[in-house]
Image (cartoon, rainbow, N blue to C red):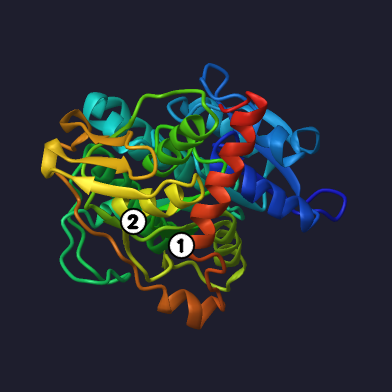
Amino acid sequence: MTNGKKIAMISGITGQDGGYLAKFLLEKDYRVLGLYRRGATDTFAKLKEHGILEKIELLDFELLEFSNICRLLRKHQPDEFYNLAAQSFVAASWEEPVYTAQADGMGVLYILEAIREFSPKTRFYQASTSEMFGKVQEVPQTEKTPFYPRSPYGVSKLMAHWMCVNYSESFNVFACSGILFNHESPMRGKEFVTRKITAHFAEIYTGKTNEPLELGNLNAKRDWGFSGDYVEMMWKMLQHDKPDTYVISTGETHSIREFVEEAGKHCDFDLQWEGSEENEIGIDKKTGKTVVRVNPKFYRPAEVEMLIGNPEKARKILNWNAKVDFKSLCRMMILADIERAKKGILV
């Protein structure tokens, strides 16, 4: 704590959650130290859009460099450390399984060990993921549901998750895991399916492209929430009197097809589906144009068909509830991308 202000470190500061969390903490008068990888492709565009870039102290950070992590923890002694950094794209984890395992698994171990050695009073939050459930063993999923990850990303995150439990139980490190189900926003990267949908539809709507949107499995179902709601839960977890694991979700599930249809309504599309499986297309009945096409190259090697969480524990213990519903989330994202497309800043 410096000058009466709590110090929060946020790794992955340039990502979707990093921006929303930093904004939330700044409003609570935290001193925010934003950790970022200098060689990353991410820019500070999201922080600029939030209007908070100048309020954050940016520090070089690398998940795979243990000495760098140790120096940062020893020097700054943060009250709270939020680890949002990761190789977080499931599809990429099949192409880069070794790097994903190192960054998402070993990187968390490095942070926990640095906290244990150099900053033992730091409270640690780990961004776990619903992808750890993978081939789901029960519906809905809770904190007690057995894990069955179906991607290198899910497996790597599971290692990190259990490391948090072990360091908490064995070394008295205050380490929490939030098992986050899919959470979206206008700040989502375009490599993720929801933002891929809204960005492409915005380009069609504003006349920037005539090419149809290409997607994989339209029937995969997810529990989609709003990132701005979920970062509050991260903070609540570290304010509790003991570390624990919590499912962060809405408790509702919707298919990718539903997301496409809901986003399309705000582009004046009247979608009609024709064909099946890899030959399926979505046609706008008003114009007769094909605006969606299934492309098998976007199928996962091992599909996760349905994820839906039960956030009851978070509701009871931490008094948390998701505020933004599915339709409001779709509307928020597509309208933001339409405005960006009109201005030529759809990035």
View extreme (bottom): residue = 316
Q: Residue at x 38, y 50 (%)?
A: 270
Q: Residue at x 33, y 34 (%)?
A: 289
Q: Position of residue 237 (x, y in %)?
A: 54, 65
Q: Nearer the viewer, residue 307 or 59?
A: 307
Q: Position of residue 292 (x, y in %)?
A: 30, 37
View extreme (top): residue = 39
Q: Position of residue 54 (x, y in %)?
A: 80, 33
Residue 340 lies, with reference to residue 283, above or below; the image says above
Residue 90, picture quadrant: top left
Looking at marks 1 and 2 on the same chain, the residue that comes earlier in the sequence is marked by: 2
Secondary structure category for the residue under label 2 = helix
Residue pointed to by mark 1: 326
Residue kind at label 1, given as amino acid type: Phe
The answer to whether residue 38 is left or right of residue 179 is right
Q: Nearer the viewer, residue 13 or 63?
A: 13
Residue 199 lies, with reference to residue 249, above or below; the image says above
Residue 110, picture quadrant: top left
Secondary structure category for the residue under label 1 = helix
In the rendered image, the quadrant that contains the C terminus is top right
Residue kind at label 2, given as amino acid type: Glu
Q: Which labelled disc corresponds to residue 33?
A: none
Binning the other alpha carbons within 10 Å of mark 1 as few (below 14), some (14 to 19) or many (20 upward) gives many
Residue pointed to by mark 2: 258
View extreme (right): residue = 3
Q: Position of residue 195 (x, y in %)?
A: 45, 40
Q: Are marks 1 and 2 in contact (CB under 8 Å)?
A: yes
Q: Residue at x 48, y 61 (%)?
A: 327
Binning the other alpha carbons within 10 Å of mark 2 as few (below 14), some (14 to 19) or many (20 upward) gives some
Q: Residue at x 47, y 74 (%)?
A: 314
